[in-house]
Every structure is written in C-alpha cells, then in structure tokens.
Amino acid sequence: MSLTKLSKKTSIPVSTIFDRLKFHENNIIRKHTTLIDFSKLGFHTRATLNLKVAREDKEALMNHLVKHQSINSVFRINNGFDFMVEGVFHHIKDAEGFIEQLNDKFVIEDSRIHYIVEDIKREAFMTDIVLMDLTSRV
C-alpha cells in the first residue's frame, strides 16, 4: 500500500508514517519487497521441496541453494528434514531437472516436492492488525 493511501486510511500524515518506517528499518523491517506474479514473467511452476541431506553435505547444499537463481527462499527445518526450499521454474520439467541435479551433486537422503497450484493467502500476516493499530493511535 502506498504511503498516501495508508495516510488516508489512518488519518496519519504521510510524513509521520514515513518517519516511523525509517525508524524501524534494519530493526523490525528487514527489507521492502514486492510480490510478483511469476506466471506473467513465464515462470509457471512454483514448488516447495523438503530435503534431508547427509550431514557432510549440509553446508555445501545450503550454499548451493542460496546461490541458485531458481530458488526464492531457503529455510532450515526439523521433523526429519533439513531444508525447505521454495523454487520458481518455467515448467515442471525444469523443477524435476533441478531435483535430479541435486541428487547428482549431493547425498540427498529424502525429499518431498509439493507443487504450488494456487496462492490463497500470501504475505498477509498482521496486515489488518497493523492497520487497526495505526488507526487506534490517532
């Protein structure tokens, strides 16, 4: 939401909202970002992969995933897996090829892939709460 629109919704001056954002940057605001419709850029396949890797390959796999151009997010997880990865690919065959490359390069002990069919709710945590909190301070 633009600062102008937020200002109108909350009746808080744009300059005050801007100052609050600047104050919280590098503290609770880690980065400003945009949600992209990847399919409009030709990337029609998104998937999450849960990966369990041999102990000796963990760090090398993590570094590989972090640097790979098709990987959007990497998380260290538990419950039988080491990493959860979100990948963005042109087609399913590209995702499958990526997994084959991982299996060739690293000792992958277990993996699960889940193709994302549709975003139902994304990056919306606390958005209404924050807006209500801002309006209650006016």
Image (cartoon, rainbow, N blue to C red):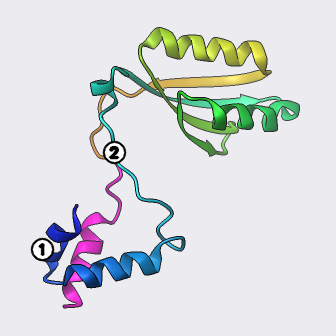
The amino acid pointed to by label 2 is: Leu
- As drawn, 66 above or below 8: above
Residue located 64% across and 24% down the image = 111
The span shown in magenta is 123-138
- Residue 43: x percent and y percent? 37, 22
Q: In the displayed structure, would residue 109 be above or below residue 135?
A: above
Q: Nearer the viewer, residue 47 or 2?
A: 2
Q: Secondary structure at mark 2?
A: loop
What is the CA distance from the residue labelled 1 to the residue labelled 2? 22 Å
Residue at the disc numbered 2: 35
Q: Position of residue 58 (x, y in %)?
A: 79, 36
Q: Quadrant of residue 117?
A: top left
In the picture as drawn, the residue positioned furthest to the front comes out as 15
Circle 1 — which element?
helix
Residue drawn at 19 percent across, 84 percent down: 13
Task: Give whichever of 13, 37 is nearer the camera.
Answer: 13
Earlier sequence position, callout 1 versus callout 2: 1
Residue 21 lies in quadrant = bottom left
Whether residue 10 sits left or right of residue 130 in the image: it is: left
Residue 59's disc number = none
Residue named by callout 1 = 9
Q: Residues within 10 Å of mark 2 (few under 14, many from 20)?
A: few
Q: Quadrant of the C terminus?
A: bottom left
Quadrant where the N terminus lies?
bottom left
